Image (cartoon, helix red, strand yellow):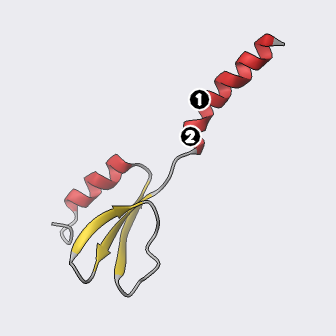
Amino acid sequence: MKKILIAATLIGAFAAPALAMDSFYIVFDNTTKKCTMSRSAPTDTAKFAMMGEYGSEADAHMAMKGMTKCK
């Protein structure tokens, strides 16, 4: 019984970070002409434009550095 409990705990520990992955969005603010990173997609499409969706924060930062609108 202890072996099953330990195995289940280890599986849960390794699976939890994979299930908790969020998307990161690069958002361009049309009024300030600046880019920001957000964890939610923009809802006000008149004020904000979505520049891309990324799986990690590092990927989003790297992409934002390469975008001409974000410089």
Dot 1: within a 10 Å radius of its alpha carbon, few (fewer than 14), some, or many (20 or more) residues? few
Disc 2 + disc 1, Cβ < 8 Å? yes
**Residue 18, labelled with which disc?**
2
Amino acid bearing label 2: Ala
Residue farthest along the bottom direction in this orientation: 46
Q: What residue does disc 1 label? A: 14
Q: Looking at the figure, which quarter contains the C terminus?
A: bottom left
**Residue that appears at 21% across and 77% down:** 33
Give the CA separation, mark 2 to mark 1. Answer: 8 Å
Horizontally, is 59 left or right of 33 in the view? right
Residue farthest along the top direction in this orientation: 2
**Residue 65, labelled with which disc?**
none
Q: Tag 2's secondary structure? A: helix
Q: Tell me residue 49's x, y (percent).
A: 35, 78
Up-down: is 37 above or below 43?
above
Q: Tell me residue 62's x, y (percent).
A: 26, 52
| Residue closest to the eye, 69 or 10 | 10
Q: Tell me residue 42's x, y (percent).
A: 43, 74
Residue farthest along the right direction in this orientation: 1
Up-down: is 4 above or below 60?
above
Quarter of the figure with residue 14? top right
Q: Tag 1's secondary structure? A: helix
**Residue that appears at 50% across and 52% down:** 22
Q: Tell me residue 48's x, y (percent).
A: 35, 79
**Residue that appears at 29% across and 65% down:** 36
**Residue that appears at 43% across and 82% down:** 44
Up-down: is 56 above or below 18?
below
Quarter of the figure with residue 15? top right
Amino acid bearing label 1: Phe
